[in-house]
Amino acid sequence: MSTSDNHLLIIEMFYGGSHQQLIRHLLTLIPDSTLLTLSDKKWHWRARCGALQLLPQLQTVSRPVNTLFMTSVGSLPEVVGLCPQLRDARKVLYFHENQLVYPTQCVKERDYQFGYNHIMSALMADLVLFNSTYNLDSFVGSINSFLNKMPDYKPKGIAELIRKKSQVLHFPVEFTVERRVIRDPKVLHIVWPHRWEHDKNPDDFFTSLQSLISSGLDFKVSVLGKTYQDVPDIFREFQAANPGYIAQWGPLDSREEYLNHLETCDVIVSTAVHEFYGVAMLEGLWAGCFPLCPNRLSYPEIYLKSVCSTLQLSWQSNSDNCVRILG
């Protein structure tokens, strides 16, 4: 899109990780685009205040915009309200995840505003894209019960309006390094490459590792993924108790190092209770790892049935299964 009347504006309020990967891929396809971003820190503040935080950048938009592409972190209606020249642009909203089914540690902790923003943004968009069928179905399927929490004036027909303009567009996973085979056939190498947060369910993972240790299995583990300010205690506890089993602890410095490290691993594990696609798991498959993940969330639609039947036996709060499969 190179002409002034056919221009793409991309907005990403959490520019890091898979969100950054997607935007970079878009820019390779449509390089003559305008990109506005906020850093991938303080997600809750981005979701609440991202449009206002982005205002100085929005005020620099002078070129006519034909299409606006934005992910669902922030509020699309607020962005358009602060930048009136976007009112007539075609608005495309991409959901990496949705807050209607986010597994809070306490029901009372659920912030209604996050889910409400998602619904309002989807209503304003002309096209709503989801990275998996599970993401789309869980979002649309939860709208009625979510809106019914309102004390009165409960809107009807919202789920149907959103579903009519929704599609699934799987996340594009790109690899920039050449695959190598560098595994140690003598020692099983397990990798857990996810965010260090409770929705990735690290408790089940480390509990299962303790069972493997008790069974006498010789293995090493790499715990990768991004860390944030509040890290569940289970990470510190396992690291302190089992230093001899650790091959890598914490994120690597570059994507190239990360992909190269995956190629030293044999088994890649997810224990997530909140996952709408699972980019890291697919990266592990590319590197030659065998996947172990729950038979829930987005995984059954991504993996072959023959693989899912194996996965169904694995890592579902059942340490005995883990010992049987890996040992």
Image (spheres, rainbow, N blue to C red):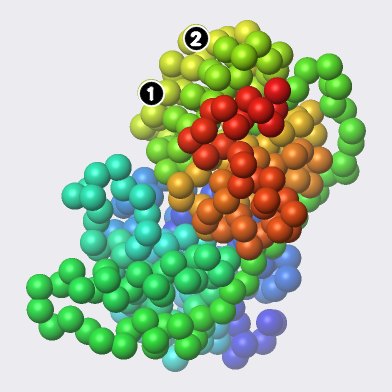
Residue ID for mark 1: 233
Q: Is residue 270 visible to us here? A: yes
**Location of residue 295 with respect to 265 vertically, above or below:** below
Q: Quadrant of residue 269?
A: top right
| Image coordinates for residue 165, horizontal then vertical, percent | 49, 86
Q: Is residue 197 left or right of residue 157?
A: right
Q: Is residue 323 left or right of residue 119?
A: right
Q: Quadrant of residue 244?
A: top right
What is the three-letter code of the residue carrying label 1? Asp
The quadrant of the picture occupied by the N terminus is bottom right
Name the residue rendered at 52%, 33% in the picture.
318
**Location of residue 223 with respect to 83 vertically, above or below:** above
The one of 186 and 39 positioned closer to us in this rendering: 186
The 10 Å Cα crowd at callout 2, few under 14, some 14 to 19, many 20 or more, is: few
The one of 70 and 147 positioned closer to us in this rendering: 147
The 10 Å Cα crowd at callout 1, few under 14, some 14 to 19, many 20 or more, is: few
Residue ID for mark 2: 241
What is the three-letter code of the residue carrying label 2? Ala
**Location of residue 116 with respect to 273 vertically, above or below:** below
Name the residue rendered at 89%, 36% in the picture.
180
Q: Is residue 82 left or right of residue 163?
A: left
The one of 89 and 318 positioned closer to us in this rendering: 318
| Image coordinates for residue 132, horizontal then vertical, percent | 58, 66
The one of 45 and 199 positioned closer to us in this rendering: 199
Q: Are the two marked residues, 2 and 1, in contact with CB atoms closer than 8 angstroms?
A: no
| Image coordinates for residue 45, horizontal then vertical, percent | 31, 52
Name the residue rendered at 36%, 46% in the picture.
42
Secondary structure, mark 1, is helix
